[in-house]
């Protein structure tokens, strides 16, 4: 499991181009084991 920073989470969910291919691959590689988001990220 990895914990995503707020902007990485938003960029990944929106398919934003600011998430580099390397970062996108890292998130996708860990998707099966779980992606975490801080509760405060939902508020932000």
Image (cartoon, grey):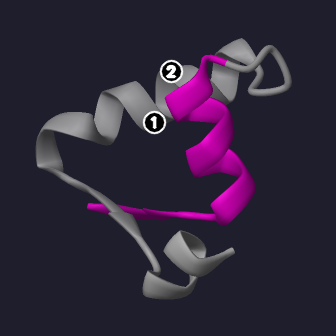
Query: Residue at position x 46%, y 80% from top?
Result: 38
Compared across the picture, whether 38 is left or right of 36 comes to right
Which residue is identified by label 1? 27
Q: Residue at x 34, y 65 (%)?
A: 36
Q: Position of residue 2 (x, y in %)?
A: 38, 61
Q: Is residue 7 magenta?
A: yes
The rendered magenta stretch, by its main secondary structure, is classed as: helix
Q: Is residue 6 magenta?
A: yes
**Residue, far bottom:** 40
Q: Are marks 2 and 1 in contact (CB under 8 Å)?
A: yes
Magenta-tinted stretch:
1-15
Q: Quadrant of the N terminus?
A: bottom left
Q: CA distance from mark 2 to mark 1?
A: 5 Å
Q: Label 2 neighbourhood size at 10 Å, few (<14), some (14-19), many (20+)?
A: few
Q: Where is residue 21 shown, x and y percent of the image?
A: 68, 13
The residue drawn where x is 14% and y is 48% is: 33
Which residue is pictured at 37% across the width and 26% down the height?
28
**Residue, disc 2:** 25
Give whichever of 17, 20 is nearer the camera: 17
Q: Is residue 8 above or below residue 25?
A: below
| Quarter the C terminus occupies | bottom right
């Amino acid at each position: 499991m990895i914990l995503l920073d707020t902007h990485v989470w938003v960029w990944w969910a929106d398919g934003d181009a600011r998430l580099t291919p390397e970062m996108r691959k890292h998130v996708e590689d860990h998707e099966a084991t779980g992606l975490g988001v801080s509760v405060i990220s939902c508020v932000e």
